[in-house]
Image (cartoon, rainbow, N blue to C red):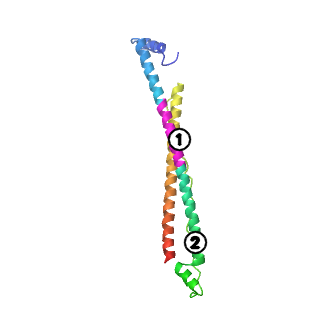
């Protein structure tokens, strides 16, 4: 006899010496709990879909940040090549006019190009200390675990994007300073 059935509740009432439950009321309560479980499942499925869509958006944004960082790396190497070959704009003009005969070599600053490490994905396992006796409880705990994993993955992606954005901001600021000093 399975737990949660009318017969089980009747036998339980006999053993405890209490009044047997009304069949109609029992069935109404059972339908309400089933409807509640179905509603929770639909909400969880919708939340998983939203998380997946958001993760796709985060992946695209992260790719764009990688692209910006690659462009900044190429720009930095071109700035360094210009410094080596031309010195400064004033030096270039002097060289072109012929008044500057020898140009001292300039030390080229090398900017550390930090590679953004992939953050380790940490997942918090769903702690389920109670024994699950019905398949619906197992499915529910699996859904909750999937939701938790999806949220953790999104947080890891957001952390990586923040690091990439900070790196891009630092690189742009440094390159702007270099270009200003190059023009002087």
Residue drawn at 50 percent across, 64 percent down: 172
Give residue 17's quadrant in the image. Answer: top left
Q: Disc 1 designates what residue? A: 52
Q: Is residue 113 visible?
A: no
Q: How many marks?
A: 2
Q: Are marks 1 and 2 in contact (CB under 8 Å)?
A: no
Residue found at the very far front of the displayed protein: 97
| Circle 1 crowding by C-alpha within 10 Å: few under 14, some 14–19, many from 20 | some
Q: Earlier in the sequence, mark 1 or mark 2?
A: 1
Residue drawn at 57 percent across, 60 percent down: 70
Magenta stretch contains residue 105: no
Helix, strand or loop at mark 1 = helix
Residue nearest the viewer, comparing 15 with 139? 139
Please provide percent x and percent y for residue 69: 55, 60
Q: Is residue 165 visible?
A: yes
Q: Disc 2 designates what residue? A: 80
Please provide percent x and percent y for residue 118: 56, 53
Residue drawn at 49 percent across, 63 percent down: 170
């Amino acid at each position: 006899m399975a737990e949660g059935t009318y017969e089980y509740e009747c036998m339980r009432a006999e053993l405890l010496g209490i009044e047997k439950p009304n069949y109609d009321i029992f069935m109404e309560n059972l339908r309400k709990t089933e409807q509640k479980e179905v509603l929770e499942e639909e909400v969880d499925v919708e939340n998983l879909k939203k998380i997946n869509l958001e993760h796709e958006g985060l992946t695209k944004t992260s790719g764009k940040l990688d692209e910006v960082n690659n462009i900044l790396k190429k720009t930095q190497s071109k700035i360094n090549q210009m410094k080596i070959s031309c010195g400064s704009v004033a030096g270039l003009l002097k060289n072109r006019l012929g008044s500057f005969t020898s140009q001292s070599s300039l030390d080229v600053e090398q900017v550390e190009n930090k590679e953004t490490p992939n953050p380790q994905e940490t997942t918090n396992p769903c702690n389920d200390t109670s024994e699950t006796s019905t398949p619906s409880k197992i499915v529910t705990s699996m859904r909750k675990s999937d939701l938790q994993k999806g949220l953790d993955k999104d947080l890891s992606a957001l952390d990586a994007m923040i690091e990439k954005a900070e790196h891009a901001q630092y690189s742009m600021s440094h390159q702007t300073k270099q270009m200003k000093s190059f023009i002087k």
